[in-house]
């Protein structure tokens, strides 16, 4: 009978987030970098008076460039939020309810993002 030596790498391979952690890390960084100019654009636009009243905001969001940038902002923000909350749940919940919490976070972020995008498009198209 021969005994097989198992290295720590071999033992960890296929367990947990091994092999997926780098992709998640990169997705967080890319979404954070995408949010910087988008949030700056939104803050400058709102500070410039485009949200003085409902009519001004509707006209501003009716411009195709503004509507596209708002949709991109919503996608990046909700994706970044989902990634961050998933990491928090995976790090701090050590029971079987972790799956439920992560699923709820994903569902809430997809629902919130879809509602924001739908509202943006309705305002941009209908006015």
Image: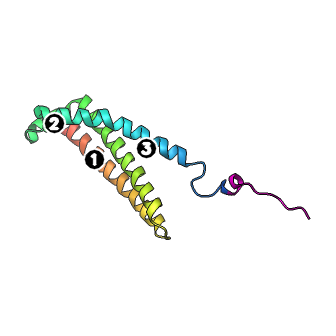
Disc 1 secondary structure class: helix
What whole-number distance in Å separates the C-alpha atoms at marks 3 and 1? 21 Å
Q: Earlier in the sequence, mark 2 or mark 3?
A: 3
Q: Position of residue 105 (x, y in %)?
A: 39, 58
Residue projecting furthest to the right: 1
Q: Quadrant of the C terminus?
A: top left
Of labels 2 and 3, the one closer to you: 3
Crowd tier of the residue under label 1, counting other residues whose Cα lies within 10 Å: few below 14, some 14–19, many 20 or above: some
Residue position marked by numbered label 2 in the rendering: 46
Q: Quadrant of the N terminus?
A: bottom right
Q: Earlier in the sequence, mark 3 or mark 1?
A: 3
* Label placed on residue 116: 1
Check whether the beta carbons of the residues at disc 3 and disc 1 lie within 8 A of each other: no
* Residue beneath the point at 30% across and 44% down: 117
* Label placed on residue 28: 3
Disc 2 secondary structure class: helix
Left/right placement of residue 11 relative to residue 68 reads: right
């Amino acid at each position: 009978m021969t005994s097989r030596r198992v290295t720590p790498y071999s033992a960890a391979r296929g367990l947990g987030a091994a092999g997926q952690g780098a992709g998640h890390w990169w997705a967080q960084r890319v979404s954070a970098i995408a949010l910087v100019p988008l949030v700056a654009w939104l803050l400058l636009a709102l500070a410039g008076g485009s949200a003085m009243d409902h009519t001004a905001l509707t006209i501003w969001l009716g411009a195709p460039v503004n509507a596209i940038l708002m949709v991109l902002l919503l996608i990046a923000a909700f994706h970044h939020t989902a990634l961050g909350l998933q990491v928090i749940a995976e790090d701090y919940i050590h029971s079987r309810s972790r799956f439920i919490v992560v699923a709820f976070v994903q569902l809430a972020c997809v629902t919130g993002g879809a509602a924001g995008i739908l509202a943006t498009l309705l305002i941009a198209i209908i006015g």
